[in-house]
Amino acid sequence: MGTEADERVVLSSADQRSSLPLPSSILYLLPLAGYWLVLIYYLGAQWSVFEQYTYGWAVPFLCLYLLWRKAAGRRQEAEPGNAERLGTEMLKGGPGRRAGDFSISAFQRFSLFLLALLYAVARFLHEANPVWRLTSLLWTLAVIGLTLLTIHLVWGRRAGGRGDGFSISVFQSFSFSDCAFPICFFLVAVPWPTGLETFLVQSLTRLNVATTIELLDLLGIPAIQHGNVIEVGKGVVGIDEACSGIRSLQATLMISLFLGELYRLTISRRVWLAVSGFALAFAFNVGRTLLLTTVASVKGVGAVPSWHDPAGVTILVGCFLCLWLIAWLLRGQRSELRAQRSEVGGPSTLNPQPSTAPTPRPSTSSAFSLQPLALALLAWFVLVEGGTQLWYRLHERSAAASADWSVPRPDNMSTAKVVAIPPGIRGQFRSDEDIELLWRDANGADWQLYYFRWLPAHSLARRVAIHLAKTHGPERCLPAAGMLLKSDLGISQIQIGGLELAVHQYIFAAEGKLLNVFYGIYEDQAGSTALVNRRLTPGSRIEAALAGSRNYGQRFLEVAVIGYDNPADAKAALVRELEKVIKVGTRPNMSSPLIPMQLQHETL
């Protein structure tokens, strides 16, 4: 009896000083902060670029809130007597175990190895492909896996229902299951696979248009569907990606999962909440489309832009409020005590019974100190980050020098006209230099030229801008505008003064005429003699990473001409015309302002 009293006095003194074991156990998890910060930084570039994932910035804070709420709930469940008993065992070191030791099996070691390897591979590939959805998902899964496994090793080993000596106060009954959902919840911020997202956008858009046509008919407003365009009496209204409902669907899925955990709903009720969110997202977007088409039929198509964004914000807020109301109703009248029992998966801990569990047997797996594990996680993080940066910087320094060229504003072409680039095109490219030219040559052929220049980029946001420009090409954008690709004549080399330029030639049919298009993207590392790796396939993305290509500097050139039916004649005319507009040996303007990025597909 005296011994126990002395131990309680010692414990009380330790608690009052600093509760040392609690900070110690948390310090073992600090190396994981580096993994998470870098991941959030790189995903943040996609959250800023893709408007449907803007909600991703809120997800890390929601995860932290759910963790804090779990910890606060556990603290309320614990009684001072339990804390003293657990703390006493901590001071003793537990039966047959020292404080700071834990058991790790061969399977757990193998899992740590695989997760660390997956992290390194995904991190390395993502550096060259900053908007690749696959590496974003694999990287996130690796970080989540490392976090959950480490937490399981630190706090998840409850020998016979007793603490292992790592936690006191808030974490004395904090379990692995408490951390699982808040950490896995971060997956909702990862962009969906492109194929899945494209399929949903197209399907939802078609369904939205068809439903709106039926509703307009019921309202007595004549309307005709042309694909994703609705024609009314005063013009046509295009249903874009924003009106498809995909943005609301992704955001409502995130909110429904969060509210389900916040109100501690059962699995079946969480499923119903998610389904309700999907139905609300679609219904509100149909209402938005119906409103815009009604405005177009009454006030004209010109009035639609002033209604578009306010309607979008209104339906999003209304959808969230309705979803919140449904979640609140689904939680019913269940008491807080019952919710706590459901979470713990057993009897309430408010009135704990004396432990009758037998003394645990010594673990057959080897004892392993937490300190080497924390140091190993930190060392691997530094090695992967440092190695990745070193690999790409070495390749950037070894890049071959190439001729400098640009397309300045022409002074020697009386027929050339500099045209203001549409905000949609300028927004999606966000280049340092840009120009659009229109002119007619001596043979009466009409020409159009786009030129964009990106200076060497030293930030993630700039690399993302350069990478996204690679996704735009005539073979993808012009058919979307109604043009038919007739021939792909491949890549050839042309001489423009002292500059050798590689161009890709296409022939399109546009309104009964042949359109010759010459296209090329050139990285500063390779020069103008080779077209860039556009990273359109997994193999090409891996190749870019192995080549150390991080897109430090790039040019984009696209020239279209109507008036030459013979491809060879069009190519010869291209050489003559480009000699008038391309200037070799000029230096880029380092003070060019940056232009905000958007994501809209535009065509020539």
Image (spheres, rainbow, N blue to C red):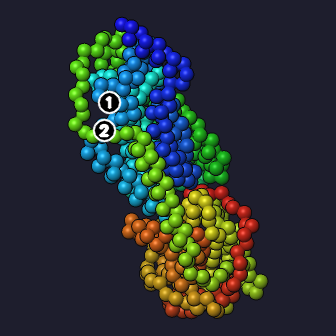
Instruction: Find the distance from the CA under tag 2 to the CA under tag 1.
Output: 9 Å
Mark 2 or 1 closer to N-term? 1
Q: Residue at x 27, y 23 (%)?
A: 160
Where disc 1 sits, the SS reads: loop
Q: Is residue 214 left or right of residue 444?
A: left
Q: Residue 25: which disc?
A: none
Q: Is residue 108 left or right of residue 386?
A: left
Q: Residue at x 52, y 65 (%)?
A: 390
Q: Nearer the viewer, residue 152 or 540?
A: 152
Q: Nearer the viewer, residue 387 or 421?
A: 387
User: Which quarter of the image is occupied by the C terminus?
Assistant: bottom right
Where residue 85 appears, x then y in whole percent? 38, 16
Q: Is residue 182 above or below residue 203?
A: above
Which residue corresponds to mark 2?
Answer: 367
Q: Residue at x 62, y 63 (%)?
A: 458
Q: Amino acid at mark 1?
A: Arg
Q: Give neighbour class at mark 2: few <14, some 14-19, many 20+ (Cα, 10 Å).
A: some
* Res 369 → quadrant: top left
Q: Is residue 89 visible?
A: yes
Q: Amino acid at mark 2?
A: Ala
Q: Is residue 350 visible?
A: no
Where residue 434 appears, x then y in whole percent? 67, 71
Where disc 2 sits, the SS reads: strand
Which residue corresponds to mark 1?
Answer: 97
Marks 2 and 1 in Cβ contact (< 8 Å): yes
Q: Is residue 14 above or below residue 598?
A: above
Where residue 77 appears, x then y in whole percent? 42, 16
Q: Residue furthest top?
A: 1
Q: Nearer the viewer, residue 547 or 313?
A: 547
Q: Is residue 20 above or below residue 104?
A: above
* Res 538 → quadrant: bottom left
* Res 194 → quadrant: bottom left
